[in-house]
Image (cartoon, rainbow, N blue to C red):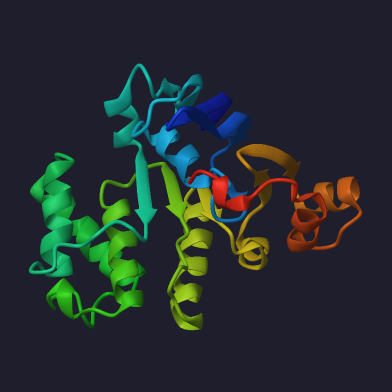
Amino acid sequence: MISVVELTRRFSQGQSEVLAVDSLSFRVESGEAYGLLGENGAGKTTTLRMILGLLEPTSGYAEVDGFRTSNSPDEVKARVGLVSTSAGLYQWLTPREMLHFFADLYGLSDDFAAKRVEDLTKLLSLERFVDQRCATLSTGQKQRVNLARSLVHDPPVLLLDEPTRGLDVIGSKVIFDFIATARTQGKAVIVSTHRLDEAERFCSRFGLLNRGKMMHEGTLADLQAATGQRTLTEMFLAGLDTTTDPSEDAA
């Protein structure tokens, strides 16, 4: 469903270049939640942006459902739902109004849009605040609306960028339940996070990034056998490159 092949991205920084993503390759199948993991600045968000077609790779490519991002960006975007804490809501619209607005952008019929909004309102427990202005919502409520917005066109692929950032235990549980539901629906999910402890709870396979390069990839059992470490956090710390200044990292 998602194929990333030798994906590379360099950024110019003054007279020098920063290698943000370094020849990254992995696959994510339908019904799978893949944890793209690493510290802040490891290259996770840059990778997601290239998969979605928001950022052109320096070399390599990404494909979604057989469509290459560089050749068919509109087809890719139609098949992907992006959830990001940096995605803003329209403060003077209600969640219901905003979901209908995005349904219209995706070209959904009025009847289908109404059903999707109703289904998502129930799935993500939006009933209590679906007709409040978004400006009045809490952080957790806003994140649930972001989830609904990403799902309104029923995409087969989901990209979640730090989905639990700023959420409390209850808000995080909503995200965990949402990912589990998406997997049962056969969606391919990439979760980008630096919360390695959380990723162990809902991802089936993992890719551990350090400075844009894949350190380890596989199931938890695969990684435990390969590294001799028990948890993802221990694996990451054992392989962390501490020879350079982490402040030099890209996004």
State how many labels appear.
Answer: 0
Q: Residue at x 61, y 55 (%)?
A: 39
Which residue is at the front of the view, 94 or 86? 86
**The one of 102 and 193 positioned closer to us in this rendering:** 193
- Expressed as whole percent of the image width and height from the top left, the position of residue 92 reads 8, 69
Query: In the rendered image, which quarter is residue 108 located in?
Result: top left
Position of 243 relative to 5 (above/below):
below
Give how far across and how far down residue 188 sits, in percent: 50, 43
Q: Residue at x 11, y 46 (%)?
A: 104
Q: Is residue 236 left or right of residue 76?
A: right
Look at 18% across and 67% down and name the residue there.
95
Q: Is residue 37 visible?
A: no
Observer-nearest residue: 58 or 133?
Answer: 58
Q: Is residue 178 left or right of residue 94?
A: right
Give above or below for 230 relative to 249.
Answer: below
Q: Position of residue 133 (x, y in %)?
A: 12, 75
The percent coordinates of residue 2 (x first, y second) are: 51, 33
User: Toward the viewer: 105 or 241?
Assistant: 241
Horizontal side, residue 148 vs residue 230: left or right: left
Which residue corresponds to the image point at 90% horizontal and 49% vertical from the top-left? 225
Q: Is residue 105 rendered to the left or right of residue 185?
A: left
Q: Quadrant of residue 40?
A: bottom right
- Can you see residue 237? yes
